[in-house]
Amino acid sequence: MGARLMLSFCYSCRTYHPQHEMTLLETKVGRRWRCIASINASKQSRAIRDEFGKQQSARNKEESLKQAQIANEKRITKSFYHVAQI
Ligand SMILES: [Zn+2]
């Protein structure tokens, strides 16, 4: 007789995994088993999302800064010509 593999239902994957690959979590609906792999995967995807969001907002900031700079330059050029014409 070998050691019986304890399986528990993983609410994340909706399937059964061996308990040694899982962790018992306290959730709103009570204690639930969840595999460590799915926890790591969701942590990773969140980190990727966060990183993407950071890059995106940095790009937006850069873009609006550029637009402001262009608008500013146009204004300066315009006022320069205005002065030159007088
Ligand atoms: Zn799982």
Image: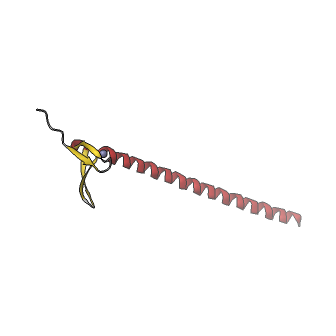
Question: Where's residue 68, x and y in %?
Answer: 67, 60
Residue found at x 71% / y 61%: 72
* Residue toward you, 20 or 3: 3
Most foreground residue, 1 or 63:
1
Q: Residue at x 60, y 55 (%)?
A: 62
Front position in the image: 79 or 31: 31
Quadrant of the frame with the C terminus:
bottom right
- Vertical order, 38 against 58 (above or below): above
52, above or below 83, in the image? above
Which residue reaches farthest bottom?
A: 86
Total labels: the figure holds 0
Residue extending farthest top: 1
Ligand 1 is found in the corner quadrant, namely top left
- Horizontal side of 44 relative to 10 (left or right) equals right
Q: Is residue 55 left or right of residue 32?
A: right
The spot of residue 19 in percent (x, y) is 22, 44
Where residue 32 sits in the image (x, y, percent)? Answer: 25, 53
Residue sitting farthest toward the right: 86
Quadrant for residue 29, please give it: bottom left
Q: Is residue 21 left or right of residue 75?
A: left
Q: How is the image coloured?
A: secondary structure
- 25 horizontally vs 82: left or right: left
Quarter of the picture holding the N terminus = top left
Which percent across, then down, holds residue 15? 29, 45
> What residue sits 31% from the left and 48% below the top?
14
